[in-house]
Image (spheres, rainbow, N blue to C red):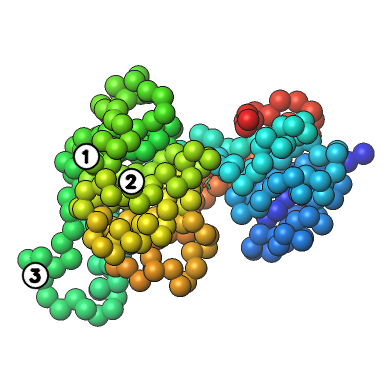
Amino acid sequence: MAHRVFVTRELPGEGFASLLTDAAVEVDVWPQDGPPPRAALLERVRGVDGLVCLITDRVDADVLDAAGPQLRVVSAMAVGVDNIDVAECASRGIAVGNTPGVLTETTADIAWALILAAGRRIVEAAEYVKGGEWRTWSPTQLAGVDVHGATLGVVGFGAIGQAVARRAQGFGMRVLYWNRTARSDEAGELGAERRSFDDLLAESDFVSVNVALTDETRGLIDASALSRMKSSAILVNTARGPIVDEAALVEALREGRIAAAGLDVTAVEPLPMESPLLTMRNVVVLPHIGSASLSTRCKMADMAVANLRAGLAGGPLPNAVMV
Ligand code: DGY
């Protein structure tokens, strides 16, 4: 009998295309552009053996209950799995897969796009031109801060944090990192110095957030952390929105306690249009596009399908998430 699978969105890549034509798998794909509403998710998972989900789908005990005891695998097309109750899956013997590695460099590119955009006021400057405000050249017009030669603080020195740090070498930056465990070998190669969390915040001109969202990192960049940063510092977050206390960030920006922010992720996504962040000239917000190059998204989808297939076959996943 064919395995039943629900995929919460149409995916790019060859793996997904081959899944659709595989007679051994009966695939139900959510046909719309947005995520399935909660009720639809609970309905569509009923009786499936495998679920392929995105970061927009909350996979908790209710979803697992709705699916039923035959569910073998939850495969995320993402590296971050904070939307999945991994412990609950493990307790039920359901494998969870993710897509690390392939998006590392692409995400680091976006962190750098934000470092440059926020530091050199790129979005503001482009809007200035499009808005017809460019009438002359003047000495301090749209003057930002230098990125080259500045100090970059990387919060979370995993693969993406290291890729962000590697790019800083080309800009002649001093690189500091904070990580739960020392990453001496990698740091040595990249010339990065380990600091306590507080010291990193106090010394950095740019702070790049690259930790995973966990119970420990939720709200890590709170009012107290922001108060330790330089008033000229720029915060860049390409990890997960809830790592930063957004209300505290708004306050800090309003009061000039930090200079600017570049955010690829926000506490609520999509960012509500009434968010004060959208009214601030010194804030660049992107719609969670860190991994959004077509090539990387195809690789992620292929990995998600490979994890799904392995899970359906009852084997170990090529990329399994452990509790
Ligand atoms: C992830 O993979 O966790 C990103 O946030 C989306 O690519």
Foreground residue among 49 and 214: 214
Of mark 3 and mark 2, the one earlier in the sequence is 3
Sequence-earlier tag: 1 or 2: 1
Secondary element type, mark 3:
loop
Which amino acid is tagged 2?
Answer: Ala
Q: Is residue 284 above or below residue 108?
A: below
Residue 222 falls left or right of residue 96: left
Q: Residue at x 68, y 29 (%)?
A: 317
Looking at the rendered structure, the secondary structure element under dot 1 is: helix
Left or right of residue 178: residue 2: right
Give the residue displayed 7% in from the left and 66% down from the top.
139
Quickly name the residue at label 2.
225
Locate residue 42 relative to residue 226 in the image: left or right. right
Give me the C-alpha separation between circle 1 and circle 2: 12 Å
Does residue 278 appear to the left or right of 258 in the view shown? right
Quadrant containing the N terminus in the rendered view: top right
Residue placed under numbered mark 1 in the picture: 203
**Ligand 1 closer than 8 Å to label 3 CB:** no
Marks 3 and 1 close (CB-CB < 8 Å): no
Label 3 to label 1: alpha-carbon separation: 31 Å
Dot 1 crowding, Cα within 10 Å, few <14, some 14–19, many 20+: some
Tell me the amino acid under the disc marked 1: Glu
Regarding residue 171, the answer to whether it shows in the image is no
Q: Which mark is residue 256?
A: none
Please rate how many residues cluster around mark 2, counting C-alpha atoms within 10 Å: few if below 14, some from 14 to 19, many from 20: some
Q: Please name the residue that numbered disc 3 is placed on.
A: 138
Q: Position of residue 269 (x, y in %)?
A: 53, 60
3 or 1: tag closer to the N-terminus: 3
